[in-house]
Amino acid sequence: MKKSYLAAKSLASGSSGNAYLLQSSQTTVLIDCGLPARTIEGCLKLRGVDPRSLQAILVTHEHTDHIQSVGTMSRRYSVPVVANAATIEAVRAQVGEIDPLVLATGDCLALGDLDIASFPTSHDSAEPVGYLITRGEARLCVLTDTGTTLPQQKEPVSLADLVIVESNHDHDLLTAGPYSELLKDRIRSERGHLSNVQAARLLAETHNSHPQTVWLAHLSAVNNNPTRARRTVSGFLVSEGVKGVKVKVALRDQPSLSWRSDNTGWQLPLL
Ligand SMILES: [Zn+2]
Ligand SMILES: [Zn+2]
């Protein structure tokens, strides 16, 4: 019998494309598919994953940086697309026919050996969501593209061993930066994107005693940088007395972070 685990790989994370590969001993899924199909296929091949073995593509919302090749991948490899009904319709309008597997926001779905639950986010799209994925004792949460934090997001974040959370912009860099006031307002709005401090506050509010790995995700290339994001979030957590959170930054345009539930990298104290 194969050992049970849950593993994740960031393939890309930012406004030019988002995709995460999730694998357990029995199930392989993508969360978002916002890169060209040939790039996704190349990433999968590099990791020995046959695209025909994908059980689903989970979609958070219909913005291009999350769905660019979802139509091609769904049709080419007969992969179902998991999303709520409003998002399925919005995705279809952009990428053509897909094989839909409707998961109403707030509901759960068993897929292979994974339990998939969705929860709402706050963003300028039809009905955006985040996901909590559970395999046995291991849990992973994806929460990006949300302009504010919602009460329904707190439990999934607090339960997760790996939290992939948006840390889109530094407030000061955005304010002083080159974007138009209209665009700045859109990003800062309750249906825009989460700042470094907002992400940090959510992590501090939801943290309990169990160790967590955090991937700061969907960083802006213009209004943020990895060092600033990590320092801001780590500094905030220290100032709030939060311990046991390992903070990493997912790179924008290339595969970067990996995580596996049975190899968390947490050192046991030497006795
Ligand atoms: Zn996005
Ligand atoms: Zn978006």
Image (cartoon, grey):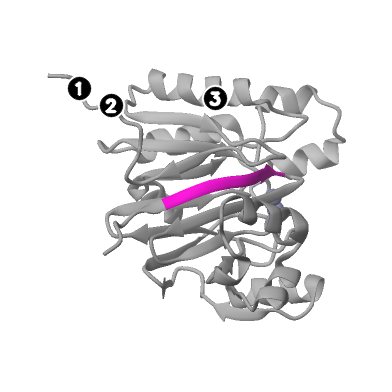
Rendered location of residue 17, percent (x, y): 72, 49
Amino acid type of the residue that numbered disc 1 sits on in the rendered structure: Pro
> Is there a contact, CB below 8 Å, between mark 2 and mark 1?
yes
- Give above or below for 83 relative to 217: below
Q: Residues within 10 Å of mark 2 (few under 14, many from 20)?
A: few
Asked if one can make out residue 150 in the rendered structure from this viewpoint, the answer is no
- Examine the structure image and report whether residue 71 is included in the region drawn in magenta: no
Amino acid type of the residue that numbered disc 2 sits on in the rendered structure: Gln
In the image, which residues are magenta? 7-14
* Side of 185 where 250 appears, left or right: left
Rendered location of residue 257, percent (x, y): 54, 38
Q: Main secondary structure of the magenta part?
A: strand
Q: CA distance from mark 1 to mark 3?
A: 25 Å
> Is there a contact, CB below 8 Å, between mark 1 and mark 3?
no
For marks 1 and 3 on the same chain, the one whose residue lies earlier in the sequence: 3
Residue receiving disc 1? 269
Name the quadrant containing residue 180: top right
Q: Residue at x 78, y 37 (%)?
A: 184
Residue receiving disc 3? 230
Q: Residue at x 72, y 75 (%)?
A: 76
For marks 2 and 3 on the same chain, the one whose residue lies earlier in the sequence: 3
Q: Residues within 10 Å of mark 3 (few under 14, many from 20)?
A: some
Mark 2 vs mark 3: give the one in front: 2
Question: For the image shown, how many numbered marks are present on the structure?
Answer: 3
Residue receiving disc 2? 267
In-front residue for pair 109/203: 109
Q: Secondary structure at mark 3?
A: helix
- Give above or below for 100 relative to 174: below
